[in-house]
Image: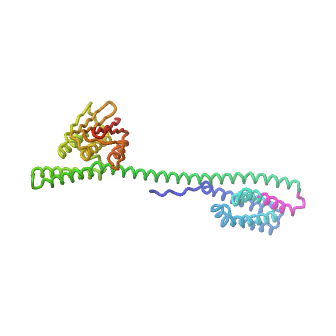
Amino acid sequence: MEQQEPVIEAADRYFWLWDAFFAVVYALVVLLVLFVAEEATTAERWGSIALLTAIAAGYAFFGRRHIAAERFGWRLNTFVAVLFCCLAGSAFLVPMTQYAFFGVIPMLFMSLRLAVAIMVVAVSIVVTTLFASAGDPNANWLTTGAAIGISVIFSVMIGVWIDKVIQQSTDRGELIKQLEASQAEVSRLSHEAGVAGERERLAGEIHDTLAQGFTSIITLVQAAESELGRDEPQVRRHLALALRTARENLAESRALVAALAPAELTESSVLDAIRRQAAKLTEETGIAVDVDVQGERRQLATGIDVVLLRTVQESLSNVRKHADARTVEIVLSYQENSVVLLVTDDGRGFDPSAPTSGFGLRGMRSRIDQVGGSLSVTSLPGSGTTVELEVCT
């Protein structure tokens, strides 16, 4: 069985987009610090850039790996703490580095649980904004407060959206895993059902052919043994029949191995095969068997031919072993939309409702079910038995 490739969740598949977004924000903020923040000293600029670079390096070599692997945990809490300190320090040195929040906020929401992330983002915005305004003597605190409020609201909205995207991706990944597990279970059960069905089919084939053939051989050899020294022609006749049965069994076994139809059907029609079975029973036991065909003969599906032949074989085998019958009548009736088989004997009969441990009738019913046919067995002790099979064509 081919090994399935692991499912890659959408959040992992498109993680590079967050990387690209953060890289763009980092580059833009560094450019602002270098070329726009004229009020800052050179030391403040390079100090701010160093802190921003520490954030970038921490994300690239530490935070990203743990965000992708576990999302929550003490390692990410440590990463967030370092992130907060670096960003606050950078904003204190160069206020416009607050724009780095556009790249940092997604990291916070991917590193922390939603409620904790909202609180940390709000505190981070307040602290860094206050740090950025602390060194500005002209700062308007009303404007600063409004900016803080707007930033917090906007950041929380973005964070909630990010968390929802990640959660949906995680749920989708779990659903895919469950579906794959269900498909694997269905495949396993189907395989087991197929194996069980094939075992049952082979058991039926062996019972209907090889086992019955061996029974006939044993019976004929025992009959020949009982005639030794008294009736040489009868001994030869029994041995000839045993030899022919053995050859037929060999042909059947080869057909089973090759997964072909019954050997008798590969070279003749089902009617010819049924007549041979009838003649064989008469030759071996002396029971008179009459085969009658009604209706216009037509070609049937191979599966139906097999069921008809196996039903006749099983019925005649039961007659041989149990019925103590004198005559058997086999009627094959070709009707407009179906074919009906009747096998009737005048033997001792039995009670069909009585439990039995044999495979015969059970295997016969199982085989008939495979072609959508119906089987009925009518019998009473002392009144013979009738087996009726009907299959729609």
300 lies left or right of 2: left
Q: In this view, does 341 lie above or below 34?
A: above
Q: Would residue 265 be visible to someone looking at this image? A: no
Colouring of the image = rainbow
Quadrant assignment, res 124: bottom right
Region rendered in magenta: 121-139
| Residue 365 locus on image (x, y percent) | 35, 43
| Residue reaching furthest to the right | 137
Residue 147 percent location from the top left of the image: 83, 54
Find the residue positioned furthest to the front. Answer: 382
- Looking at the image, which is closer to me, 46 or 181? 181
Q: Is the magenta stretch mostly helix, strand or loop?
A: helix
Q: Does the magenta stretch include residue 138?
A: yes
Residue 329 placement (x, y as % from top left): 24, 37
- The residue lying toward the viewer, choosing from 309 and 108, is 309
Q: Quadrant of residue 21?
A: bottom right
